[in-house]
Amino acid sequence: MAIKRIIPVSSGKGGVGKTTFAVNFALALSRHGRTILVDLDTGTSAIRHAIDVPIGKDLYHFFRRNEPLANCLTTLDDRLDPNRQYRDFSFVAGPLHLIEEITNFGPAYKERLISAINSLDADFVILDMKAGLDSNVIDFLPFSNSGILIFTPHLPSATLAASDIVKAILFRKLRLIFSRQSPFFETVEGRLDFFRLANDLIDKVEDVYDSSVPNLDAFVTDLGQNLGPEHPITRAVQNTVDYFRVHYVLNLFNGVEDSFQTAVKPFVDNLTRNVSSRVTISNLGWITRSDAVHRANCDRIPALLVEPAKRNVKKDRIAQELDDLRITAIGLDRIQKKAHNAPLNTADPGDHLSRQLDALKTMYAQKKNDDYVANFEYISERAMFTIDTRRPSEFGDTKIWPPEQMLSTVFTKAKK
């Protein structure tokens, strides 16, 4: 069985409710197909502590006892899911205690785990990533989108750090395109000097202490001035940025103005200033601030498994909202490919902010009375809509790509 989508859930820093979202999002998605949640935040064993069920085997058994990853799945018991509504949900827990080689695994462990995840028998695989950014996060992320970023109005530093994840993914892809091992390298006439120029500019953009090339938009402009706007290298960089998609969810949502001013605006400002104003940004929805979710976490019961006192939303309303908001508010309409001869660096950072604010206002007008259960259902419906209508590379991916396997794919896309 081929995996339809592997979707990482990331955050710039801890404390934003990433694992709470990942658990309940995976549960909601399991209503659409077999879903496996994998705990890659192995230092905290967060999923183990979020779901109060007996766990027989976990990543310890996979790494130390050579158990197949498929044998390390844990399902919900009848106490938590008496009606078997979530029978298609399972999870792989981190080890019971911190184990250094599992928490900070090296290349061999990483390669083995990536292969095992890619081989899971599931429709959807959700990866609960470690907060922050290091090689054990970046190597599990897609090459052409952010997965799902989680941030909240209440932790500004984590919101700003989320844009660092976008930057890291984009630079990893650019480094791959302009590596000596890339098939693209062999197609460019006078390639050695051109690739040296491209990599020198990448170094300057990536260096936060060097303001001479502040972001990827300036990088494209410099390439266009030095090589020409139609040069393959210029177009490769521009296409990498133009087709990149950022997906985010606001957790602990507490109203349009507060969420926009303290979370969305700083995120978009930081992203457009330090990365690019040309990437496409999509708000997948929000999770309402709720004492019920906090109580569920304290009880180690996923919030979706607690029957709310009152359901404020029906599924047919969610479907209607998807249709109503598809083009005007949420940005699920098909991305229009930039014209091949479009002027370089014409995106306006303010456009991003106005679109995000309009989306928040429109969604709030229609969803202000929703509870957290409807929030998760809505986001899962959004995810399914995106999976069904967009290229796999635009939202998660069908596999975790090791760099050496991704080279030919990157080469094909870079030529377009």
Image (spheres, rainbow, N blue to C red):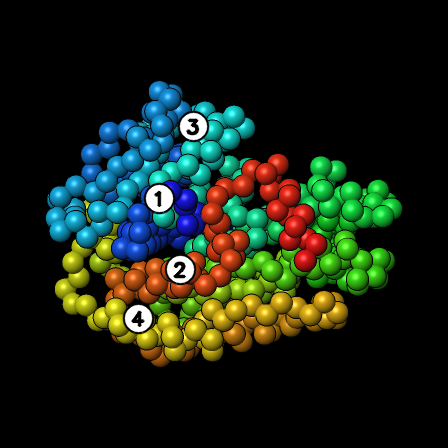
Closer to the camera in the image, 353 or 316: 316
What residue is rendered at 40% in x and 53% in y? 16
| Mark 3 vs mark 4, CA separation in Å | 41 Å
- Is residue 369 shown to the viewer in this render? yes
Q: Around disc 3, counting alpha carbons within 10 Å, would you say few (fewer than 14), some (14 to 19), or many (20 or more)? A: many
Taking the image as shown, residue 207 lies to the left or right of residue 63, namely right
What residue is shown with label 2? 383
Whichever of labels 2 and 4 marks the residue nearer the N terminus, that label is 4
What residue is rendered at 36% in x and 48% in y? 123
What residue is rendered at 85% in x and 58% in y? 226
Q: Around disc 2, counting alpha carbons within 10 Å, would you say few (fewer than 14), some (14 to 19), or many (20 or more)? A: some
Q: Secondary structure at mark 3?
A: helix
What residue is shown with label 3? 102
Whichever of labels 3 and 2 marks the residue nearer the N terminus, that label is 3
For the residue marked with disc 4, what is the amino acid?
Ile
| Mark 4 vs mark 1, CA separation in Å | 25 Å
